Image: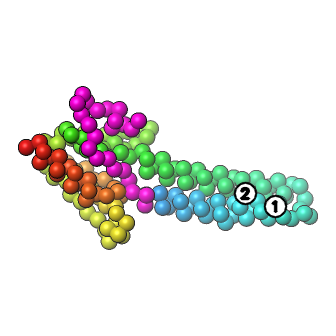
Amino acid sequence: MTYVESHLAAGETVIYQTRLHWIVMLGHIVLGCLLLGLPGVFLLYYAASQAGIESKTLHIMEGGGVVLLVCGVVAILMGMVRRNATEMALTNRRVVIKTGLVGRTTIEMLLNKVESIEVSETVLGRMLGYGTIVVIGTGGTPEPFHRVAHPLEFRSKVQQQIEKLH
């Protein structure tokens, strides 16, 4: 159960949910693949295919290969955790944005207090479907959230829900 689902008030329902785009994992995936593919697998393959290596050198090569494989998997898992630690949802009463896993930050804004939602997308963001959302509440400060998946759809759903309130 997600954070938003577990913190709904009585009679409140989730209208739309989104999260960070997969692009936030790109650096982690590249690093993980570099550690997994090139040196990690190569070291293990080389150690297994060479018959005349002394056992001490063989153990060092195998250990190094395993360490590189583990580091590659950890790098990819860190990217997955980073992506999944952010939730953005629209309910029939409010906008809820939660970031963080261990240290958590939440922004919950009643729909009648949302002044505007600004969306900015780079060229690459438009092609891949991500952008920055800035939620501005009445009397509040702007809260930017970068690399959000489908930002225009999120803004559209919020605007539709605000119109239903009036």
Element marked by disc 2: helix
Q: Is residue 11 magenta?
A: yes
Q: Is residue 76 above or below residue 11?
A: below
Q: Position of residue 22 (x, y in %)?
A: 43, 58
With respect to residue 76, does 99 lie above or below?
above
Residue 39 spot, x, y in % from top left: 69, 64
Q: Residue furthest toward the bottom?
A: 123
Kindly state the secondary structure of the residue where label 1 is placed. Answer: helix
- From which residue to which does the magenta span run? 1-24
Classify the position of the N terminus by image quarter: top left
The quarter holding residue 127 reads bottom left
Q: Identify the mark at residue 65; answer none if there is no mark.
A: 2
The numbered disc on residue 47 is 1
Point 65% across, 51% down: residue: 70
Crowding at label 1, few (<14), some or many (≥20) Cα neighbours within 10 Å? some
What's the distance in space between the residues labelled 1 and 2, CA to CA? 9 Å
Q: What is the residue that sits farthest to the left in this orientation?
A: 166
